[in-house]
Amino acid sequence: MAIGFLIAGLACAWACTWEISLGPGDGVRSFKFETDIPNPALKKDGDIVMTRDFLLMDEMRSQRYLDTFGPDKIGALRRVTLTVVDVHIVGVDLATTGPPNLVIAGHSLSGKPGASVELDDDQVDWLRSRLLDAEPVVTTLTVDLRAPLAALDARVPSLHITVEIQPTLVIDGTRTF
C-alpha cells in the first residue's frame, strides 16, 4: 500500500508542475509608456490611433531581474501575463469615451484597469532569452480610441498619453531547485 502511494506521488511530481508567480510583491515592477501626440480635434477628428515602440525593460532593469531572480528562475520562465494598471489621456474625457483599445506585442485588450493578456509561447521564449542575456526588451504598443469630437479638448495642441502595465512572470518551480 505504501509503495502505491509512493509511486502515485512520484508520478504526480513528474507530471505536475509547481508554478511560482512573480509580481509586484517580488520586485517585478510595472512599466510606463508616455508620449505626446498632436491633438486630432484640431483637424476636427476624434480618432486617436498611436503606434510606437515601447521599451518594456532597459538593460539595467533586465540585469537587475537576472541578478535578483538568477538564471535558474529566469530560465524556468513559462508564462507572462500583462495587466493594465492605468491608461490616461490628458485632453480626452475617458469617462465619456470609455477606455481605448490597446495592442501590446500583437495582443489586443481593453485599456480598462485589470484587463490582461498572456504572451504566446514564442514571445515568452524570446523574453526569456533577452532576460538571460540582460538585454533591453522592446515591443510595439498601439493605443486606439474612436471618440466623439466633443470628448476631446480642442484647446490643447497635443494629447499626453500614459499607459501603465504590470507584468506577472510565472516560472516552473520544479526547475528552480
Image (cartoon, helix red, strand yellow):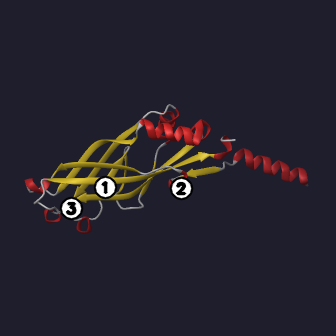
Please identify, in this view, whether the residue under mark 3 or under mark 1 is nearer the observer: 3
Q: What residue is at 45 percent from the left and 41 percent from the top?
A: 61
Q: Which of marks 3 and 2 is nearer the N terminus?
A: 2
Q: Which amino acid does label 3 sit on?
A: Val
Check the image and name the residue furthest to the left. Answer: 43
Q: How many marks?
A: 3
Q: Position of residue 81 (x, y in %)?
A: 48, 51
Residue that numbered label 3 is attached to = 92
Q: Which of marks 3 and 1 is nearer the N terminus?
A: 3
Q: Where is residue 132 in the image (x, y as percent from the top left)?
A: 53, 34
Q: In which quarter of the image is the C terminus?
A: top right
Distance of label 1 from label 2 (alpha carbons) = 28 Å
Q: What residue type is labelled 1?
A: Asn
Distance of label 3 from label 2 (alpha carbons) = 33 Å
Tag 3, which secondary structure?
loop
Tag 2, which secondary structure?
helix
Q: Residue 25 carries which label?
A: 2
Residue that numbered label 1 is attached to = 101
Distance of label 3 from label 1 (alpha carbons) = 14 Å
Tag 1, which secondary structure?
strand
Taking 52 as reference, is 113 left or right? right
Q: Crowdedness of circle 1 by 10 Å Cα count: few (<14), some, many (20+)?
A: some
Q: Which amino acid does label 2 sit on?
A: Gly
Q: Which of marks 1 and 2 is nearer the N terminus?
A: 2
Taking 72 as reference, is 12 left or right? right
